[in-house]
Image (tube, rainbow, N blue to C red):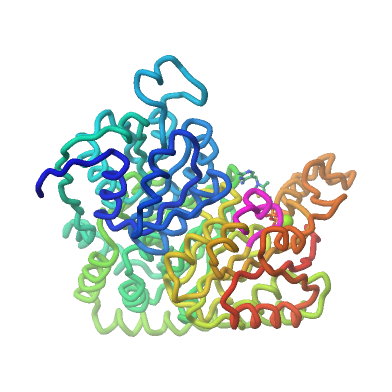
């Protein structure tokens, strides 16, 4: 491409547009003034203002995950990047391809340590695949193209580029270059696939744990084929961020619980774990019991070599993309199956699917039995949600202690239509749901947010109103950090004896969510029963504006 005279700020926007960026989430300061000036003449890229940098980051994360492509955001120098770090951690754990940019003091001025100054790449590098500062306008195309290429290359993840003011203000004739992409659908090593097939073939009671890498590569259909060929139940990983397998499938088992003993129960009931792009096994607490017995056979497929055999020895570790590798595994397995194997497999299929169906029926009747309770039972709330949502609805999940049953009840929800908090840094759901909705304008996003989590980033409601982003925010209002009360109570210490849970009650005063929503221009209703919730949700789904539904939910935690 011919060299044209340009400015750093113009070049920055031209490069973003060239890389396919349509939205820049941001929160500006003085170091962003050159960029904001360029935005005054920008027609293609939309600037979405979020009122704190952690929100900027979570919105970009949601957008990246839902669009399955690059998302971009901009934060203000060291304090802004500092505010973004918690949500950058979540984005890194989720493998979200986000280009995080920050304004920086002009070089030279920076070394005098002015207001707001600290070196930025060393702050960002812990939670990114690549962190760099541009030093001249001529470097911008190479560094930005490299950053975006790196974010999108498997395993995907966030990257960081700092732009000093003098670089943004510089003028010059610059070759803009062209974007590059690393083709992601890498087929795993044939020898490892053959080894895995032999192990799967030998197993009498295999179990599959499915994770993000399957959803990210669009491999749900391929995983269904393998699960059926094996007659193996499919669990979701312990911190499911996506829906890699349809909940309506007879082999769908729901998420594993992130505790060592609960996982051990599952692995002991089987004789092989096949992890399809799942993490093995992210725990919340140090385990009393290890999740797998010594020498337990594990077959693991993932796009990230770091995850393979990270904590447990793996009998077959396959580095590859699930969409292209799973069919090869299914083929290799089919090649080993005799007629006798097939009839054993068919008998297993009927036993496994009837056990799953019985468990699901029991879960349903438990939820139905609690449906009249006030405050609302969280289990019945999840059931009502699953029953009411149309297939095109997209769920954003930060329901924390209230989400039991959610995945099983999402019977209408196809793979791809769910995004959950990965990493565990809370305050993600409210802003992430706005990013997801902006990436999927033809779908309707319903965000499930704990009341405590909501208060980390409540001002995201303002962006929803300002940018007319029609998310339905369901606030699960139990007036507490209920999960912490559950966990502290389980330790049977002084708090449990005295019934005194310091720092975990959100009362005196109770938080007025409908008032907060109204103050930021988002219509809101309070509901106290399941029928009221269903009515509010249905009305919300029919409208085209954001809505907050504040659900008074059972605070019981024992
Ligand atoms: C950034 C961050 N700060 C604190 C925590 C610790 N933490 C985990 S869950 C939780 C409470 C969540 O409360 P809420 O959203 O109301 O859900 P509930 O426990 O009531 O289900 C807290 C404070 C965290 N995970 N991340
Ligand atoms: Mg709560």
Which one is nearer the viewer's eye here, 347 or 383? 383
| Quarter of the image with the C terminus in it | bottom right
The relative height of residue 460 versus residue 31 in the rendered view (above or below) is below
Q: Residue at x 51, y 37 (%)?
A: 80
Q: Position of residue 95 (x, y in %)?
A: 39, 51
Q: Residue at x 20, y 61 (%)?
A: 187
The relative height of residue 131 versus residue 550 in the rendered view (above or below) is above
User: Is 322 left, or right, of 493 in this rendering?
Assistant: left
Q: Position of residue 432 (x, y in %)?
A: 52, 57
Q: Which residues are magenta?
A: 449-461
Q: Residue furthest right?
A: 498
Q: Residue furthest left?
A: 2
Q: Quadrant of residue 192?
A: bottom left
Which one is nearer the viewer's eye here, 96 or 440? 440
Q: Is residue 392 visible?
A: yes
- Based on the picture, tell me whether residue 346 belongs to the magenta stretch: no
User: Is 275 left, or right, of 260 in this rendering?
Assistant: left
Please count the marks in the image.
0
User: Is 158 left, or right, of 353 in this rendering?
Assistant: left
């Amino acid at each position: 491409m011919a060299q044209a005279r340009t400015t750093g700020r113009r070049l920055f926007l031209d490069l973003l547009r060239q890389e396919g960026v349509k939205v820049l989430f941001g929160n500006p300061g003085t170091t962003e003034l050159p960029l904001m000036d360029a935005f005054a003449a920008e027609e293609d890229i939309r600037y979405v203002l979020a009122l704190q940098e952690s929100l900027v980051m979570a919105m970009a994360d949601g957008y990246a995950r839902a669009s399955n492509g690059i998302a971009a955001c901009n934060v203000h120098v060291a304090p802004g990047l500092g505010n973004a770090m918690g949500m950058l951690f979540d984005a890194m754990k989720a493998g979200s391809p986000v280009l995080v940019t920050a304004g920086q003091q002009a070089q030279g001025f920076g070394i005098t340590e002015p207001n707001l100054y600290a070196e930025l790449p060393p702050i960002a590098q812990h939670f990114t695949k690549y962190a760099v500062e541009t030093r001249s306008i001529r470097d911008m195309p190479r560094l930005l193209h490299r950053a975006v290429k790196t974010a999108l290359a498997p395993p995907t993840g966030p990257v960081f580029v700092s732009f000093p003011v003098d670089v943004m203000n510089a003028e010059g004739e610059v070759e803009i270059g062209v974007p590059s992409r690393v083709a992601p659908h890498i087929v795993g090593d044939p020898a490892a696939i053959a080894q895995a097939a032999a192990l799967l073939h030998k197993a009498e009671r295999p179990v599959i744990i499915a994770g993000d890498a399957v959803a990210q590569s669009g491999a749900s259909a391929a995983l269904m084929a393998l699960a059926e060929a094996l007659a193996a139940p499919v669990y979701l990983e312990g911190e499911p961020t996506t829906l890699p397998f349809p909940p309506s499938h007879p082999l769908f088992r729901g998420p594993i619980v992130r505790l060592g003993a609960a996982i051990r129960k599952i692995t002991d009931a089987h004789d092989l774990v096949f992890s399809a792009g799942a993490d093995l096994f992210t725990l919340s607490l140090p385990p009393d019991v290890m999740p797998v017995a010594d020498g337990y056979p594990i077959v693991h497929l993932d796009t990230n070599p770091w995850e393979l055999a990270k904590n447990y020895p793996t009998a077959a570790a396959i580095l590859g993309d699930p969409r292209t590798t799973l069919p090869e595994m299914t083929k290799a397995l089919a090649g080993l199956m005799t007629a006798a194997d097939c009839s054993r497999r068919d008998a297993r299929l009927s036993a496994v699917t009837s056990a799953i169906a019985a468990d699901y029926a029991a879960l349903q009747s438990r939820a139905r039995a609690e449906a009249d309770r006030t405050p609302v039972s969280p289990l019945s709330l999840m059931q009502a949600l699953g029953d009411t949502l149309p297939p095109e609805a997209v769920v954003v999940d930060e329901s924390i202690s209230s989400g039991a049953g959610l995945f099983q009840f999402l019977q209408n929800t196809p793979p791809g239509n769910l995004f959950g908090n990965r990493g565990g840094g809370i305050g993600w759901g409210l802003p992430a749901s706005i990013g997801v909705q902006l990436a999927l304008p033809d779908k309707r996003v319903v965000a499930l947010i704990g009341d405590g989590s909501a208060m980390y980033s409540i001002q995201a409601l303002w962006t929803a109103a300002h940018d007319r982003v029609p998310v339905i925010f369901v606030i699960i209002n139990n007036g507490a950090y209920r999960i912490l009360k559950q966990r502290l109570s389980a330790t049977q210490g002084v708090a449990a004896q005295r019934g005194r849970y310091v720092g975990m009650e959100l009362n005196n005063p109770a938080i007025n969510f409908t008032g907060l929503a109204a103050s930021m221009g988002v219509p809101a209703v309070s509901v106290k029963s399941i029928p009221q919730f269903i009515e509010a949700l249905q009305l919300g789904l029919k409208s085209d504006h954001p809505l907050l539904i504040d659900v008074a939910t059972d605070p019981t935690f024992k």
